[in-house]
Amino acid sequence: MLDLERRNNRRAPLSLRVRLAVKRGIDIVLSILLLLLLSPLLALTALIILVSSGAPILFRQTRVGRNGREFVMIKFRTMSTDAEQQLDEIKAENQRTGPLFKVNNDPRVTTVGRVLRRSSIDELPQLFNVLAGSMSLVGPRPALPAEVVEFSDELRRRELLPQGLTGLWQLDGRTDPDFTKYAELDLRYVEHWTLRLDLWIIIRTPFVILGHLICRDAVDAVEPTSNATSNTTSTTGVPFIPADALRTAPRIEPQIADLVRRDSSLELAE
C-alpha cells in the first residue's frame, strides 16, 4: 500500500509536467502560425503608427511573470510620446479600483491608438513574448511591478502560471473597473487551470473582441461604477462562462504550487 501511494505521488507531478509542456507546445505552434498569418496586419499597423505619430512604434513595459520574474512586455504604441509626463495631470480621474489605472477617453491616447485598443490589435506584438516563453497565450493578466507590491500573498498565487495574452479577466472584465473582480478571475483560472479551459478561452477571445467592436455604444454607456455585468453575460452582451462553472472543477493550483516547490528550475520556456 505504501509503495502504491508513493507511485501515485510521483505520477501526479509528472502528469502536471506533461500538461505544462503541452501548454508550452501549443503556445509555440499557435504563436508562430498567428505571426505568419498576421504579418501583413502587423506591418501595416507599424507603418500607420510611424506615419501618424512617428517613432517609437512599440511600447515596452516591465511586467511580472511566472514565479515573480520580471520581463519586458511589448505592444503597439497607442499613446502620445509624452504620455508619461501627462500622467500626473490625470491621476485624479482614475476610474479603476485598487492599484489599476484607467481613464475613459484618456487624452494621451492617439486617434490611431483608440482604434488599435478597441480592436485589440495593439496587443498582437505580445505574440513575440509568447514565442519567447515570457508569456503564454492564455493566463492571468501581466501585472506591473507597482501593482504586485500591493498584492496580498493570496493574489501572488497568480504567478504560479505564465501570464497570458488573453484570459478570463481579459474576456469578461475588459470594461469592468473593479480590481477585486479581475483578481478573482485570475485566481480562479490558476486554481482550476486545464488545457480544455485554455482552448475554450482561445476560441472565445475573437468573438468577445468582435462583440466589443459591434457593441461600441453599449460599452461606452456602461458607468464606471456599474455592477450591471451579470455572471453569464459580459458588458458587450456576449454570453460568458457562468460564475459557478469553474467551482466544480478539481483544484489544480495546489499541484502547481507543489511542483514549483519540488522543482523551482522548471520553466515553460525551456
Image (cartoon, rainbow, N blue to C red):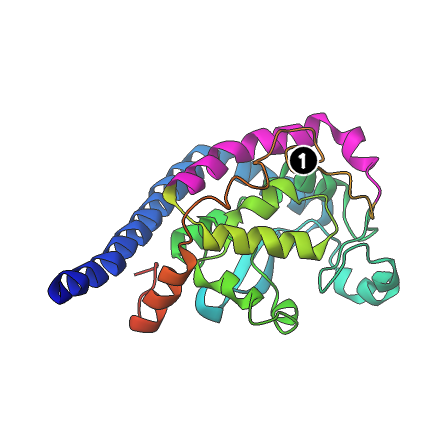
Identify the element where label 1 is drawn: loop
Name the quarter where the N terminus is drawn: bottom left
Q: Mark 1 points at which residue?
A: 234
Q: Kindly tell me whether residue 39 is visible in this rendering.
A: no
87 or 218: nearer the eye?
Answer: 218
Q: Kindly tell me whether residue 189 is visible in this rendering.
A: yes
Residue 11 position by quadrant:
bottom left
How many marks overall?
A: 1
Image coordinates for residue 43, horizontal then vertical, percent? 53, 39
Outermost residue toward the front in this view: 1
Name the quarter where the C terminus is drawn: bottom left
- Magenta run includes residue 198: yes
Task: In the rendered view, tell whether residue 235 sits above or below residue 149.
Answer: above
47 or 31: nearer the eye?
Answer: 31
Image coordinates for residue 134, horizontal then vertical, percent? 44, 59
Image coordinates for residue 104, horizontal then vertical, percent? 82, 47
Identify which amino acid the numbered label 1 is placed on: Ser
Magenta span dominant secondary structure:
helix
245 or 221: nearer the eye?
Answer: 245
Outermost residue toward the top in this view: 214
**In the image, what residue occupies the spot 30% across and 50% down?**
19
Relative placement, left or right, of 236 versus 248 is right
- Magenta run includes residue 96: no
Task: In the rendered view, tell whether residue 163 sits above or below residue 33.
Answer: below
Q: How crowded is mark 1: few (under 14 residues within 10 Å), some or many (20 or more)?
A: many
**In the image, what residue occupies the spot 32% across and 53% down?**
20
Image coordinates for residue 166, horizontal then vertical, percent? 53, 45
**In the image, what residue occupies the spot 26% across and 57% down?**
12
Task: In the rendered view, tell whether residue 124 sits above or below residue 191.
Answer: above
Relative placement, left or right, of 3 versus 126 is left
- Highlighted range, magenta: 196-223
